[in-house]
Each structure stands twice: as C-alpha cells, then as structure tokens.
Amino acid sequence: MCGIVGYIGKGSASDIIIDGLSKLEYRGYDSAGVAIHNGLNIEVEKHKGRLDVLASELEKNPIEGSLGIGHTRWATHGEPSDANSHPHLNNDKSLAVVHNGIIENYVELKEELIGEGSEFLSQTDTEVLPHLISKYNKGNLLDAVMEAVTHVRGSYAIGVISKNSPGELVAARKDSPLIVGVGKEEFFIASDIPAVLKYTRDVIFIENDEIIHIKDNKIKIYDKDKKEVEKEIFKVTWDIEAASKGGYDFYMDKEIHEQPTVIKDTIERRLNPEGDIVLDNINITKEQLKDIKKIFIVACGTAYHAGVLGKHAIEKLMRVPVIVDIASEFRYGENFVDENSLVILVSQSGETADTLAALRNAKEKGARVLSVTNVVGSSIARESDDVFYTWAGPEISVASTKAYTTQIVSLYMIALDFAIKAGTIDKETYKNIIDNMLKLPECVQSVLDKSESIKDIAKSMINKNNAFYLGRGADFSLSQEGALKLKEISYIHAEAFAAGELKHGTIALIEEGTPVVAVSTQDTLLEKMVSNVQEVKARGAFVISIAKEGNNLIEGVSDRVIYIPKISDFLAPVVAVVPMQILAYHVSALKGLDVDKPRNLAKSVTVE
C-alpha cells in the first residue's frame, strides 16, 4: 500500500514523479501529492482522490524543478483528506517527507515534539517525521535522517528533501519496500520497479536499515552505523509494455486471459529435456526432506487460498502433515515451528508485511523458509532460504487472478519434486501428473472461450446483495477464492461454506432467488455435492454449478452449469477457478464499478 517516487537529475521532477506514481496505482490509494524543490523553496501540491486530480492541478499550475518526491496514500492514520495527504512538512516548510509504513510510537513522539514547539496539521503518524528530522538537522540532512530513524519504532520507506539542500535526496527503509533506479546523470527512488522502467532498467534493491544518499550526481548507501554498503545493480529484463491493457477494458480481464500463457511458462521453465522437474532456486536434498516433520504454509488473502490447495497436494503426495495459517495470525499463537519445520510463504508481491513478519519469526525459531512469489528481488525472496518464482509477469489489477493460478501450480510442482525425492510416489505417478499439468493451459483456454456465456449468467447476479459458494474437499478451498473474488470487486456479500455444513446453520440464509455457486469438480464427492445442491435448490436458491464435462448429474439440480474440461480431481482446481474469476469480473463490470481498483483495497499490503 502507498506508493513512493522520488527524482533527482536534470529532468522535470514533477512530470517524472506523476508518471512514476501512475505505474504504482495498483497498490491502492485515496490521495496523492508531490513536493518539488524549485531552486529556492519546496512547493507542495496534494489532493484527496485519484492521481488525475493532482495531475490536473499541476497542469494548471506547474512546479518547475529537478528534485522532488511524490506519494500515493492509502489511509491508515486519519481519514482521506488533503491535509492528511503526503508529502508532509516541518513548521517552516523547509523540509518535506513521504512515507510508506506505520510509525508505531508516533503518539509519544508527537507529544514530545508538540512540547518542543512543533505544530501539527494532520492526523497522520507520518507527520512526526519531518518535525523529528528537522529537530536533528544541524546542517547535514543525511545525519539528521539517520538520527531521526533511530527514535522511530515501526515500518517505513521514506524520501526526504530539504529547502537548504537543492541537490540532495535522502531515503531510508525498514520493513517497507524501496528501490533505487540508476539512470544517466539521474536517480530515482520508488516503492516498486514499474515506476522507473520508463527511464532505466538498472535497479538497486534496498535492504532493512539502509539509508540512501544521493548528492552531486553520486549515490552512496549506508547501514545504520553509517558504514558504506556495496550494492549490486540488478538489470530488469521484463518490459513495461507487459503491464499495459493490450486492448482489454480492464487489467483484470487481460490478466485472466493471460493464464494459459503464464501457467505454461511456470511449468515448462521448470522441466528438463527429460520432462522432470528442476527447481533451480530450491536446494532441499533428499536427506534434508527426511528431517522435515511438519510443513507450514503461511500467506494472506488469495495467496492463503492457494496455500490451502497446496496443503491438499503436499499431504496427498508427500504424506507429511501441513498446517496452513493466515500470516497476520501466525506469529501471535503457539505455532510449534522448530528446526525440523519447513515454512512455505506465498506472496504475489513478496512485500506483504504480515508474511514478511512470519518469515522472520520462522527463521528465529530455526525453520527453513521457502517462498513462492512473483517478484524477483522482493524482500521475502531475498530473506528466504529457497525461492520458487512464479512466472505470472506484472499483475496490475488489485484482484489477483493469474498470480493465484501460478501459485497453485508452483505449490503442486514443489509437492511433486519433494515427493519423488522422498520416495512417497513412484515414477509413473510423477510422470503422469506432470503430463497432465502440461494440458492445463489448453483446459484453461477452453474455459476462457466461454466468457460470453458466463457474462450472461453474471447478469442474473448484479442486483443481488448476497451470494453463497459451496464445495467439498479441494472444491471448498476453491469456493473460498471464488467468494473472495466476487465480494472484493462487486461489493456483493459472498461467503463460502463446506457443503456438508449446510444443515449446521448455513441453510437458514437461503431464500428465494439467492445465488449459490456450487463447485463440483471432485469426482469422488460428486454424488454428495448433488445432494447438498438439492437442499439449497429446494429452498429457492438460484444454483450456478461448475462441473467437469460428462458429469451431467449436476444438471438436474442446477439452473445454470459451467463445464470445465475433464481432468483429474487433483488438477481440477487450477481450471475450475477460472469461471469464478470471469463471473466476478463480469458482475463488477456490468455494475459499472472500477474493476481494477476496488474501494479500500490495495495490491501490495505493506503494513500490518
């Protein structure tokens, strides 16, 4: 959440920052602002609302200058408003700060600063930073920032400029993402790579407790003890054009339709010429696998739902108990992680704050940590012992689709690799599953070809206030993701229930016309699902079933059926989620909502 862009060079800071912030809109925000050094003073323009509001104001009243910082804010402390928008200033407006994260001790810092004469204009935690830095500024901006952050508890990525330092940009990071773009006689800071790709492909990843100092066309990076740190420059190879809409009305629709390609890439890039799985960045040996007594899968939101399906796969193939936990809960309970545990983290961005905290908790307890993420060089990837990169490419829409399906595929491949090494499956089973996985792109494409007929079903749901999703076994896990997709982008209340639990209370919620999406792709549970669907149908539900071709038994108890190609129960979830993604997309689009930027949500949740 929140996006930071900073610039120092010879170009128009205002134009470059606005352009960079536009590439970070997927992170979610409710206000935007810039602070530009005009050669004499710092000028600030900031507004509640979309980035377009800020851009329009800057077109009317341009701010000239080649040094500046910008920010898109997702409200945590204080409501969305002009006053609470970033950047924030000190009292004499000589110093400006943008911040991503949460200052946990801001109340005590604020009281102390007010007692020393500082005046606050916002409700934010961030505003303590410019006052705190100003307090310690004795003419050296770098030293002032380094001293100020020692008094701060919490998470931060900050960018700082000073009226008295027209050629200087300072930034710092702790637990919130920050990168540096290195151009020709110009430098950029940003929360994520897309913000700088238009200008440079050379990127430096900033680690915790590192401070960036850019001055006199030179960059130096220090640790918290002010020892200079040598950093490698990472060359970005993917193209920003991959993040464009490509003729689709919304990124979500484009990303849904990219799934055959990204699933194919995720699978085939991990197969050797003999068709065996090779996990280059996972170095767990057969002997080490024998020492693993428990596996934990930890994630948030959609990634958590992928983790639940990963549990089904690992337990089925490896015969090792798997505990799936929500990252925000993981470190606050007795999780029983120890040196004989493997902790698998799943995060699209690789920057999810709760998941990152779980990682560090697990490592403190001696566990080995394996991450599944979509972003090379992300914090979670860098701090893990082993990494499996999904090949989903840039995912812009807040509602995750292609990242989710590639996460499932990734977890399945990890399960297969571990199982064959541990000897819990034979070579024939191993090869058969891989051969069938290679058919997944074709199966997904066949569902995508039904988008218009699914749109017709969506029309029956746009005026509903509630919807329910049912499933058994892996289908129940899948139905949870289907319900999440519908509610997060259409604002229809949607809940998923284990179909066998209907009689234990849930069925009381069913009334005439209530939409019920019944996921029925597990052959071994089909007859039981049919019985459960009959129960809701008898009480007036409008039933939309998702089933495999040939399982016509479901038609007799459904109003509409969406068929997926016949595939094994094990792999069916990868295909069966797609019609639910399409359904949610069409409901949202038909309601005239902003599909890619649902209210109150962010793509990358970088605060607890």
Image: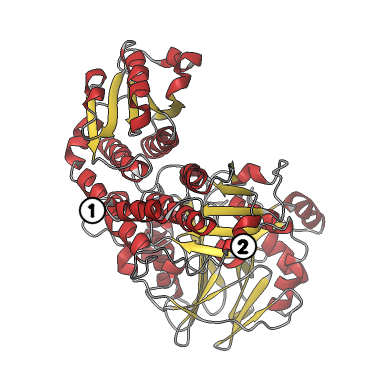
In three-dimensional space, the C-alpha distance between marks 2 and 1, rounded to whole angstroms, equals: 49 Å
| Vertical side of 4 occupied by 548: above or below | above
- In terms of image quadrants, where is residue 158? bottom right
| Image-based side of 348 in relation to 272, left or right | right
SS assignment at label 2:
helix
SS assignment at label 1:
loop
In the rendered image, residue 73, in percent from the top left (x then y), is placed at: 52, 54
In the rendered image, residue 202, in percent from the top left (x then y), is placed at: 46, 80
- In terms of image quadrants, where is residue 534? top left
In the rendered image, residue 318, in percent from the top left (x then y), is placed at: 52, 49
Q: Which residue is mark 2?
A: 287
Sequence-wise, which precedes: disc 2 or disc 1? 1
Whether residue 36 is visible to the viewer of this picture, yes or no, is: no
Amino acid type shown at disc 2: Glu
Q: Which residue is mark 1?
A: 248
Q: Which residue is rendered at x = 51% and y = 50% of the image?
A: 424
| Vertical side of 126 occupied by 168: above or below | below
Residue at the far top: name it: 538
Whether residue 139 is visible to the viewer of this picture, yes or no, is: yes
